[in-house]
Amino acid sequence: MSKTTSSSEFERNNVYVSIKRTLIPVLVGSILAALTALGLDVDPEALLTVLTGIYSSAYYLLARYLEAKNPTIGKILLGSDTTPLYLEGPNSAD
């Protein structure tokens, strides 16, 4: 007996996966930025803002590159080895 998934359940799962795959790199970038700010004589808030974006982007790009080589890496680095699948909904542009 196969398990059927409703459209709304499928959509919720995709949203959850996409959020998780975005938030984990941001979290890692924030941690790296905070560690970098230690011991520097600059405005920590400004530095954190800039470095968080840089580190998060670099982390995500590296994670996606490594995931393309070995899909299991995605689960470790991005929190899921499932790439979100976005279906066209009633409000999507043609």
Image (cartoon, grey):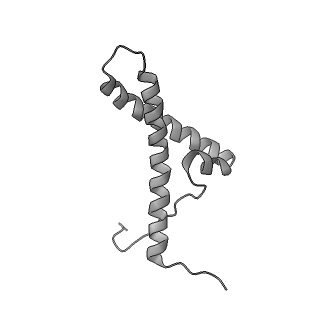
Task: Answer with left or right where residue 80 lies relative to residue 33.
Answer: right
The count of marks equals 0
Residue 46 sits in quarter:
top left
Residue 14 x/y as whole percent: 48, 64
Residue 12 x/y as whole percent: 44, 68
Q: Nearer the viewer, residue 92 or 18?
A: 18
Whether residue 48 appears in this view of the structure is yes
Residue at the spot x=43%, y=35% of the render?
30
Q: Is residue 29 above or below residue 6?
A: above
Residue at the spot x=52%, y=63% of the render?
85
Residue 3 sits in quarter:
bottom right
Task: Answer with left or right where residue 68 lies relative to residue 11.
Answer: right
Residue at the spot x=36%, y=68% of the render?
92
Q: Nearer the viewer, residue 29 or 83?
A: 29
Residue at the spot x=61%, y=47% of the render?
76
Q: Is residue 36 above or below residue 49?
A: above
Residue 77 x/y as whole percent: 58, 44
Residue 11 x/y as whole percent: 45, 69
Task: Answer with left or right where residue 7 lies relative to residue 68.
Answer: left
Quadrant of the drawing holding the C terminus: bottom left
Task: Answer with left or right where residue 81 lies relative to residue 18.
Answer: right
Q: Is residue 89 above or below residue 74?
A: below
